[in-house]
Structures are given as C-alpha cells and as structure tokens.
Image (tube, helix red, strand yellow):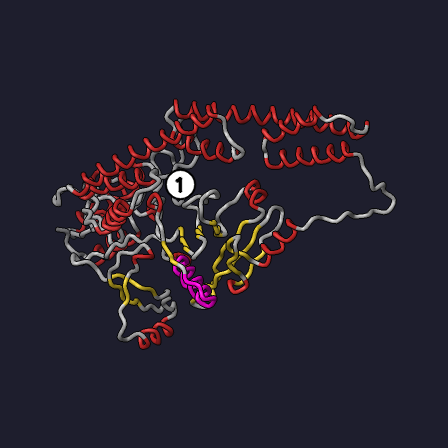
C-alpha cells in the first residue's frame, strides 16, 4: 500500500530506495514497471511510465481500490492461519468464463476444498465437491439456508494499511455472526465457526417436552399433524413455492379426524393457499409469455430483465417447457452479445486503419460510436477493454482544428442600434413616434400602439451617426470615428468586421477599445 500523504511518501521512498515496483498480474495489471507520484494538492499514487510515443501508458487493470487485492489478502491470511495449525493448502485464482482475476479463490485442503466467492461474478455451486464461502455482497436464498442449515461468509476490514479477514455464519431468520479467523477450525463438515458448532449441536439434540401450566399436555395426533401442515403452508407462502403449497393441500384433503374448530381453520388455510397458488401460477405464466414476446420483438434488454426476474421467481424448479423457453432466451442473448462483439471488432479494425491525415472530427465520431456499442456489451475481454481505454484516452489528445470564425459583416450591414451607444439613443426627439429627449421610442401603429420599443426607430439614430461627419465638413476637420465592429474583439477574438460570438450587442471591451481609438484619433486602415 502506497501512503497517500506527501510526508509519508517521502519516508516510504527512503525505506524502499533500492526497490522497484511493478504492476501486478494477479491484480489484473499489465506487469510493467511503476513509479511513485508525489502530490501536495491530491493523494499520492503509483503510476506507469509513459509509452515510447510519449502518450500515457494504458493499463487493462480496472479496479484500483484497496478491495481489488482482497484475494491476495485472503491467500496470505489463510496460509498463515493453516500453517499455525500444521496444515498446508494450495491456492488458485481461477477465472471461469473469463471473469476478472480475484473474483474466486480456490483453497485446496488435504481432505476438503473451499471456494471463496468475493463478488457476484461467479454463482455458487452448492452441489459441487467444494464448500462455497460467500462474500458479503453475494446473495443466498432462503431455501439454501434451510436445506444446508447455514452458510459461511467472509469479509475483509481495513486496519491501517492491511486487511483483516473475518468469517461469518448466516442461518435462516438469524443475523450473521462474525468471528476472527483464529476462532475458526477445519472439521469433517468443512469450515467451522462457534456459530456452526451451536447450530449443529442444536440440530442433533432432541428437543425436550415443555410443560405449560393450565394447558392440556396431550393433543390428538391428527391435530398435531394439522398444525404442522398449516406451518408448512405458511413456509410455502414465505418461500413462494407453489409446488409445496399444492402438495400440502393434497395432504390436507387426505387428513381425517381433526377437531371441528381446527378443521375450519385448516379448510380456510387450504382455500387461501389454493387461491394464492393459482395467482402465482398465472403470474408465472404471464412472465414466460412476456419473455417470449420480448424475444419475438427483438428487445434484448427486456429479455435480459425478464430472464433475471424468472430465475428469481422459479427457484423451486421449472417445467420442461419453461426450461426450454429459458434456454431459448439464453441462446438469444448470447447471439445478441456475439453480434455486438462482432460489430465492436469491425469498428475497432476500422478505427485502427483510420488515415493519419484525415479530419480528427471524423475519427471522434467513429470513437463515439465505438464507445456507445461497447456500453451495451456484457463481457468485452481484456484485449477489447484495453483497446477501448486506448482510444478513449487518445480522443482527448486529438488535434481538433479551431472552430471557423463567423463570416465578416460589413459595417453598413450592422444594425443601427448597435452602431450607436445606448447612452445616445434618446439624445434627440424621434421624428416617427414623437418621443421627446430622454424618452424611449414607442410603437405608433397596430394593436401594440403605445408600448415601448426595445430599440429606437432608425430615423432617430441616423442623425446621431451622421452628425460627426457633418461637423467635420463644416469645420474642415477630418476626425476618425471608430465603431465597435471596426476593431477586433479582445474577449472572443473575432476579427474586425465580424460579429461577436454572443447574441445582441458587442462585448463591452470591444466598444471601449473603439472609444479609445477615437479619442486618440488613430487612423483606420
């Protein structure tokens, strides 16, 4: 772990003066050499050396937080823990279906095998030879907890620059209990915690008969069975298992000899369970109908969403027809994904062959299309991801040509109210609307008569423009008058004669510059 503060990094550099640092392959890195970057205004960090072309090196490692090395912390902690007990184990960071390295850690013990799932990239296989140990973000359904009695979990807590491993045990309707690794053992059942020992002991110990004052201790066997059937119906509703609910209803039909009051409760529970099962079956049928329709409409996102919903709704099993529909949906999504990847490869090949002398804006359009297609893909692979990162970075360094300037606008075509300062708009009476000195012009015709105009009439402004020229003729003095559009704009950089890039009047700095040149009597070119 590289220290984040500059003063700590100085000490770190002195301590490792003769060491080198490399981008770890087991972290999903590229294996190239790293250097340390010291900053006072942000956190310090490792960085790659630039490439031979001077551009920043692009590494395929996506996760850079402290949790991205949790699989290495797990290996180190478990190895130390086992060695202290005189046991050695083998470790393997498997990558099924190309998942990122570190999602799964296999631990091979002398008699058993553990598979640690640190994230949700790989679904746990409860029927395999290994025992799954789940990260805190990996979900587990109630049926699995009931069937297996418990599930072990793992989490890593930061302590300074290290990560501490803790093992938890989760059971049905119970919160997860957490323990230090030293409190755990490897038994014939697998990974065991103090909570596991209590659960196993409770399961294997027969329950004692409890005496309740004021109640009859002996209850007919049929009534006991009726209570058990109603509990099973409640469990079926809670776990959304329609098959279990229907099976219990059949057992209720075959049960006889129940006391009258309990029989009424049993019949009501049976009716409600059958209505619920029928409603759930209809909802399930509707899900599969919508899935088939989404495939027919070629709506991949809808198919993916419905497929996830169906897998959650059919955890208790599916019919052969339903399995066929699910397989068709999975095949369709695989074909869509393959088509996206093929399109992505075509775009990458096209971009890599892009001529160096072409307009960079055309290249930007192609890269934008590439990133848009990649956003809809699920598994790009390391090579494609590295190519995307490369072009995404290069896009920021493309030499785009400057935006073309606005066409030049001759002075005589500039609106009259822009050629006269606002302070001079009302220095003369208006010959059109009759507005006096200091009054704004008004509309004098049509339905808007009497309303103030946003700008003066042209006949009112024309004498203001002509007055300097007339005075020059009378006195024989040639005076240079600079207008705003006669000079370049200091704010937006527009050339003389071109409009400013902002709508309306020119920038104030441009008008000020024109007044300065007029006062200095600078000749116009």
Above or below residue 172? Residue 333 is above
Q: Is residue 65 something one can see in this rendering?
A: no
Q: Decide which of 491, 72 is in the foreground and name it.
A: 72
Above or below residue 512? Residue 239 is above
Few, some or many residues within 10 Å of mark 1 (<14, 14–19, 20+): many
Is 438 situated left or right of 167 in this image? left
Is 57 situated left or right of 41 in this image? left
Residue at point 69% right, 36% down? 231
Residue at point 47% right, 66% down? 85
Residue 70 included in the magenta stretch of the image: yes
Res. 353 image quadrant = top left
Relative image position of residue 486 (x, y in whole percent) = 20, 48
Relative image position of residue 102 (x, y in whole percent) = 38, 53
Residue at point 26% right, 38% down? 344
Relative image position of residue 109 (x, y in whole percent) = 43, 57
Chief secondary structure of the magenta span?
A: helix
Q: Is residue 114 something one can see in this rendering?
A: yes
Image quarter in which the N terminus is found: bottom left
Q: Decide which of 371, 23 is in the foreground and name it.
A: 23
Residue 150 included in the magenta stretch of the image: no
The part of the chain drawn in magenta is 69-88
Residue named by callout 1: 440
Find numbered disc 1 in the image and state the secondary structure of the residue it sits on. Answer: loop
Residue at point 64% right, 49% down? 203
Q: Decide which of 326, 149 is in the foreground and name it.
A: 149
Is 372 situated left or right of 402 in this image? right
């Amino acid at each position: 772990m590289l220290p984040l503060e500059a003063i700590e990094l100085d000490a770190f550099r002195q301590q490792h003066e003769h060491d080198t640092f490399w981008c770890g392959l087991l972290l999903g890195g590229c294996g190239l050499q790293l250097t340390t970057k010291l900053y006072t205004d942000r956190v310090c960090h490792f960085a790659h050396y630039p490439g031979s072309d001077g551009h920043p090196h692009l590494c395929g490692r996506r996760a850079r937080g402290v949790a991205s090395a949790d699989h290495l912390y797990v290996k180190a902690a478990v190895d130390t823990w086992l060695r202290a007990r005189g046991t050695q184990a083998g470790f393997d960071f498997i990558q099924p279906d190309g998942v990122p390295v570190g999602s799964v850690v296999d631990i091979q013990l002398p008699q058993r095998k553990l598979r640690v799932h640190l994230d949700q990239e790989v679904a746990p296989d409860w029927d395999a030879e290994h025992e799954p140990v789940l990260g805190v973000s990996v979900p587990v359904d109630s049926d699995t907890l009931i069937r297996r009695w418990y599930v072990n979990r793992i989490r890593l807590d930061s302590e300074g620059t290290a990560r501490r491993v803790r093992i938890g045990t989760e059971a049905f309707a119970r919160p997860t209990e957490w323990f230090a690794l030293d409190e755990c053992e490897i038994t014939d059942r697998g990974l065991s915690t103090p909570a596991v020992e209590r659960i196993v002991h409770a399961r294997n110990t027969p329950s004692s008969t409890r005496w309740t004052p004021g109640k009859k201790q002996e209850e007919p066997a049929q009534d006991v069975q009726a209570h058990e059937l109603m509990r099973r119906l409640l469990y079926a509703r809670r776990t959304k298992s329609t098959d279990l609910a229907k099976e219990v209803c059949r057992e209720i039909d075959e049960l006889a000899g129940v006391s009258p009051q309990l029989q009424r409760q049993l019949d009501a529970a049976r009716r409600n369970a059958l209505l619920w099962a029928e409603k759930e079956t209809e909802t399930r049928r509707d899900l599969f109908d919508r899935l088939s329709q989404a495939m027919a409409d070629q709506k991949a996102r809808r198919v993916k969403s419905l497929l996830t919903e169906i897998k959650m709704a059919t955890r208790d099993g599916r019919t052969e027809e339903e399995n066929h529909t699910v397989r068709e949906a999975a095949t369709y999504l695989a074909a869509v994904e393959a088509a996206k990847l093929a399109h992505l490869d075509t775009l990458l090949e096209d971009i890599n062959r892009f001529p160096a002398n072409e307009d960079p804006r055309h290249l930007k359009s192609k890269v934008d299309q590439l990133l848009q297609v990649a956003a809809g893909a699920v598994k790009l692979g390391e090579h494609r991801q590295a190519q995307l990162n490369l072009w995404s970075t290069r896009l920021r360094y493309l030499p785009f040509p400057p935006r073309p300037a606005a066409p030049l606008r001759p002075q005589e075509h500039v609106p009259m109210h822009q050629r006269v300062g606002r302070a001079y708009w009302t220095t003369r009476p208006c010959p059109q609307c009759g507005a006096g000195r200091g009054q704004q012009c008004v509309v004098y015709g049509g339905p808007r008569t009497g309303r103030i105009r946003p700008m003066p009439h042209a006949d009112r402004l024309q004498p203001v423009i002509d007055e300097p020229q007339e005075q020059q003729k009378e006195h024989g003095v040639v005076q240079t008058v600079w207008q705003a559009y006669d000079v370049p704009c200091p704010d937006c950089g527009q050339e003389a004669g071109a409009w400013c890039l902002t709508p309306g009047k020119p920038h104030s700095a441009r008008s000020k510059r024109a007044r300065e040149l007029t006062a200095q009597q600078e000749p116009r070119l």
